[in-house]
Image (cartoon, helix red, strand yellow):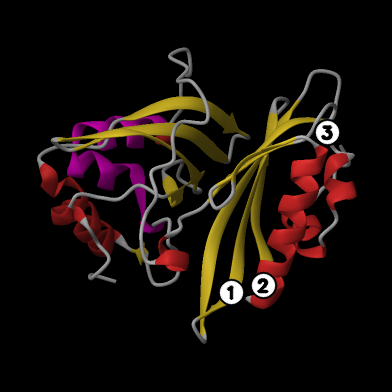
């Protein structure tokens, strides 16, 4: 796989061949809209259909960040789309899972469907949980507080002018301690925290991307659902940003859709 491999750019161009040649074996892509795509024939069909859809919605992609380690690369982007005559900037995370010996083993794509369809879709786990994962520093502090519904711990894990962004993107981003306090107070209003099952952790020392399965939201038990979140450490070592990519539907009491 070339160092400048750009999944979303190749998808916009309809370049199925360019995508296919990045894999060490048969191509595998797991996409929120289209599901699991396996093999060259299915990839060609998926790329062709998606390129047409992106063109119809005047897609324009902006890379936000890239996080890498030996096992995988996480590409964060925002894709501008014309939806019902209104623009929307959809956050998308792409995980490039490397095979032994080079090339890709699998691509996993994460984003919310809510801006596209007005609803959520249960996305079953893409990966098994990995109890051996040990997080470091502020991401670990944040996850302990999130699981416990500890508002004070959440605020302590963020820098004062940090930003947290929900999966839908757009106006669903909150900057500063008071706005963060408000949104997490709502998130924890369903009788507890939001524990996650960790599946992978990609940490480059500055940012940590965690693929997870969401299983509970407060007192509500949910069917396990796949997602990824990126936590960026600021100068102090606390979090300067948190960016979430999933399609989990919150309990009604914790739903922020009317708050932004």
Residue underneath mark 1: 81
Which mark, residue 23? 3
Left or right: 176 with respect to 12? left
| Quadrant of image for the N terminus | top right
Asked if disc 1 and disc 2 are in contact, CB closer than 8 Å, the reply is yes
- Describe the element under mark 3 as helix, strand or loop: loop
Q: Does 244 appear above or below 113?
A: above
How many C-alpha atoms fall within 10 Å of the one at disc 1: few (<14), some, or many (≥20)? many
Residue underneath mark 2: 59
* Residue 7 visible here: no
Query: Counting residues from the N terminus, which is met first, the one under dot 1 or under dot 2?
Result: 2
Residue that appears at 19% across and 49% down? 251
Query: Counting residues from the N terminus, which is met first, the one under dot 3 or under dot 1?
Result: 3
Q: Position of residue 176 (x, y in %)?
A: 32, 63
Residue 160 included in the magenta stretch of the image: yes
Identify the magenta region: 140-165
Query: Counting residues from the N terminus, which is met first, the one under dot 2 or under dot 3?
Result: 3
Q: Does 19 appear above or below 97?
A: below
Left or right: 189 with respect to 176? left
Left or right: 178 with respect to 176? left
Residue that appears at 85% across and 38% down? 22
Q: Position of residue 81 (x, y in %)?
A: 58, 74
Front-most of 118 and 71?
A: 118
């Amino acid at each position: 796989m070339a160092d400048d491999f750009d999944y979303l750019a190749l998808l916009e161009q309809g370049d199925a061949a360019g995508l296919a040649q990045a894999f060490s074996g048969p191509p595998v892509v797991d996409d929120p809209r289209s599901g699991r795509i396996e093999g060259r024939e299915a990839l060609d069909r998926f790329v062709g259909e998606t390129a047409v859809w992106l063109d119809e919605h005047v897609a324009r992609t902006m890379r936000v960040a890239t996080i890498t380690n030996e096992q995988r690369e996480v590409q964060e982007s925002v894709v501008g789309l014309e939806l019902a005559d209104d623009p929307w900037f959809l956050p998308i995370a792409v995980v490039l899972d490397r095979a032994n010996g080079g090339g890709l083993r699998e691509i996993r794509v994460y984003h919310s469907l809510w801006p596209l369809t007005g609803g959520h879709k249960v996305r079953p786990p893409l990966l098994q949980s990995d109890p051996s994962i040990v997080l470091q520093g502020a991401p670990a502090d944040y996850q302990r507080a999130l699981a416990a519904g500890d508002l004070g711990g959440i605020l302590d894990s963020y820098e004062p002018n940090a930003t947290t962004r929900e999966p839908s993107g757009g106006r669903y981003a909150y900057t500063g301690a008071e706005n963060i306090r408000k949104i997490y107070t709502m998130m924890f209003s369903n009788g507890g925290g939001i524990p996650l099952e960790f599946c992978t952790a990609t940490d480059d020392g500055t940012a940590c991307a965690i693929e997870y399965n969401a299983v509970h939201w407060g007192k509500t038990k949910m069917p396990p659902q796949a997602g990824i979140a990126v936590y960026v450490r600021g100068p102090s070592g606390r979090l300067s940003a948190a960016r979430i990519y999933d399609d989990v539907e919150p309990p009604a009491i914790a739903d922020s859709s009317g708050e932004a």
